[in-house]
Amino acid sequence: MLIRTHILAQHPEWVIFEAVCGEDAIELVDNERPDYCTMDINMPGISGTDAAERILSKYPLMKVVIFSANIQETHKNRARSFGSILVAKPVTEKSIALTLDYFTNSK
């Protein structure tokens, strides 16, 4: 909810969907085809990292940011290996700024 609040404060025109688990996130992306996606590593069912990897294998142009308090280099490298980035928690103005920059300015 914190991510939603921060993003909508800067982009009130964006539509945000929420999933309760990794499997739901994959289904939601298949049905809604959003431009951007945020994930938490720790989700019920499959991890957010696994869900993001599956999503990006189907939709490689989508931009996905994974949030986690566990920012070990292995997690960062895995996220990069399938086309995502890892942003450190807790969610702050800085982490939201990194996320929005990745969404709107990266290629």
Image (spheres, rainbow, N blue to C red):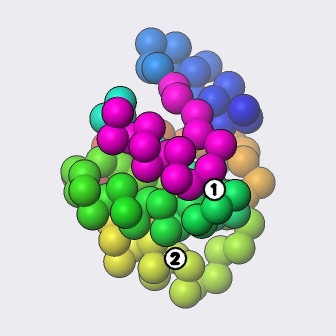
Spatial CA span between label 1 and label 2 = 13 Å
Q: Quadrant of residue 96?
A: top right
Relative to 26, 72 lies left or right = right
- Residue at point 52% right, 76% down? 76
The number of discs equals: 2
- Residue at point 34% right, 71% down? 82
Is residue 99 something that shows in the picture?
no
Vertical order, 5 against 94 (above or below): above
Q: Amino acid at mark 2?
A: Lys
- Residue at point 57% right, 21% down? 8
Vertical order, 54 against 22 (above or below): below
Residue 70 at x, y = what percent? 71, 73
Q: Main secondary structure of the magenta part?
A: helix
Query: For the residue labelled by badge 2, is the local secondary structure a helix, a strand or a loop?
Result: helix
Task: Identify residue for label 1.
Answer: 40
Task: Identify residue for label 2.
Answer: 76
Please give the label number shown on residue 89: none
Camera-side mark, 1 or 2: 1
- In front: 102, or 22? 22
Relative to 65, 33 lies left or right = left
Q: Quadrant of residue 90?
A: bottom right
Query: For the residue labelled by badge 1, is the local secondary structure a helix, a strand or a loop?
Result: strand
For the residue carrying disc 1, how many other residues have a C-alpha within 10 Å: few (<14), some (14-19), or many (20+)?
Answer: many
Q: Amino acid at mark 1?
A: Asp
The residue range painted magenta reads 16-31
Query: Is-magenta flag for residue 18?
Result: yes
- Residue at point 72% right, 48% down? 91
Relative to 24, 61 lies left or right = left
Residue 25 at x, y = what percent? 50, 46
Vertical order, 73 against 60 (above or below): below
- In front: 70, or 9? 70
Query: Is-magenta flag for residue 32?
Result: no
